[in-house]
């Protein structure tokens, strides 16, 4: 959700100012971080507990690696790790769709979730509802690709996700990012072409 956008006082013609690769794709990365007020369990079954707040970080770059959108979001929930990661992917796709940055290449460090999304069938587990939503979002933009990226190449989104834990509402920066994370965001910038 974009809470506010600066509007010019005079009429301005809309024009496409964001650039994409030769195939017309933007690059979207996601991350998540969980903070709990009651308890936090780390293990193969994921993260859970009462009073948990999940932080989500999203970065959308063009083919040159320039940041087009960054976001720190959060929500209250006691979720397993795969569900939290799937929610991060879903929220990032929604943000890209709202802003019109499709088609895109989606990178997530959640390899198990990426595999679930690529399967033809929707799992009959709790995560299946979110996977179904993600598949519907992907169907709205042919050419959108989702893939696995190692966490070491995705640290900027995790910094944004940690920031998401400390904010009360979703934060969105258009063609910008929180400057406290500048070294990490610029360090994560890959050669995308």
Image (cartoon, rainbow, N blue to C red):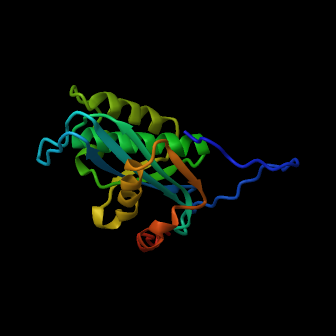
Q: Position of residue 160 (x, y in %)?
A: 42, 56
> Which corner quadrant of the image does residue 89 belong to?
top left
Q: Position of residue 174 (x, y in %)?
A: 61, 55
Q: Position of residue 113 (x, y in %)?
A: 27, 44
* Left/right of residue 84 with respect to residue 182 in the rendered view: left
> Which corner quadrant of the image does residue 173 belong to?
bottom right
* Left/right of residue 115 with respect to residue 176 in the rendered view: left
In this view, 76 is above or below 178: above
Q: Residue at x 60, y 45 (%)?
A: 99
Q: Nearer the viewer, residue 191 or 82?
A: 82
Q: Residue furthest front?
A: 37
* Left/right of residue 115 with respect to residue 17 in the rendered view: left
In this view, 48 is above or below 176: above
Q: Residue at x 14, y 44 (%)?
A: 41
- Residue 136 in sight from this viewpoint: yes
Q: Residue at x 32, y 41 (%)?
A: 53
Q: Position of residue 127 (x, y in %)?
A: 26, 32
Q: Residue at x 60, y 41 (%)?
A: 3
Q: Nearer the viewer, residue 28 or 12?
A: 12
Please state, as top left, top right, bottom left or bottom right, where the N terminus lies in the image. top right
- Residue 118 in sight from this viewpoint: no
Q: How many marks?
A: 0
């Amino acid at each position: 959700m974009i809470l506010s956008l600066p509007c010019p006082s005079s009429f301005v013609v809309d024009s496409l100012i964001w650039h994409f690769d030769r195939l017309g794709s933007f690059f979207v990365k996601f991350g998540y971080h969980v903070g709990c007020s009651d308890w936090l369990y780390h293990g193969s079954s994921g993260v859970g507990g009462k009073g948990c707040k999940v932080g989500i970080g999203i970065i959308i770059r063009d083919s040159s690696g320039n940041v087009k959108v960054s976001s720190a979001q959060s929500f209250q929930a006691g979720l397993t790790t795969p569900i939290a990661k799937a929610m991060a992917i879903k929220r990032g796709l929604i943000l890209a769709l709202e802003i019109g940055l499709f088609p895109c290449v989606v990178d997530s460090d959640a390899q198990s979730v990426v595999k679930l999304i690529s399967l033809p069938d929707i799992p009959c587990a709790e995560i299946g509802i979110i996977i179904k939503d993600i598949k519907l979002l992907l169907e709205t933009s042919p050419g959108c690709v989702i893939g696995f990226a190692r966490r070491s190449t995705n640290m900027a989104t995790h910094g944004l996700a940690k920031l998401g834990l400390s904010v009360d509402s979703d934060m969105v920066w258009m063609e910008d990012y929180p400057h406290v994370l500048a070294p990490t965001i610029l360090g994560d910038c890959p050669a995308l072409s």
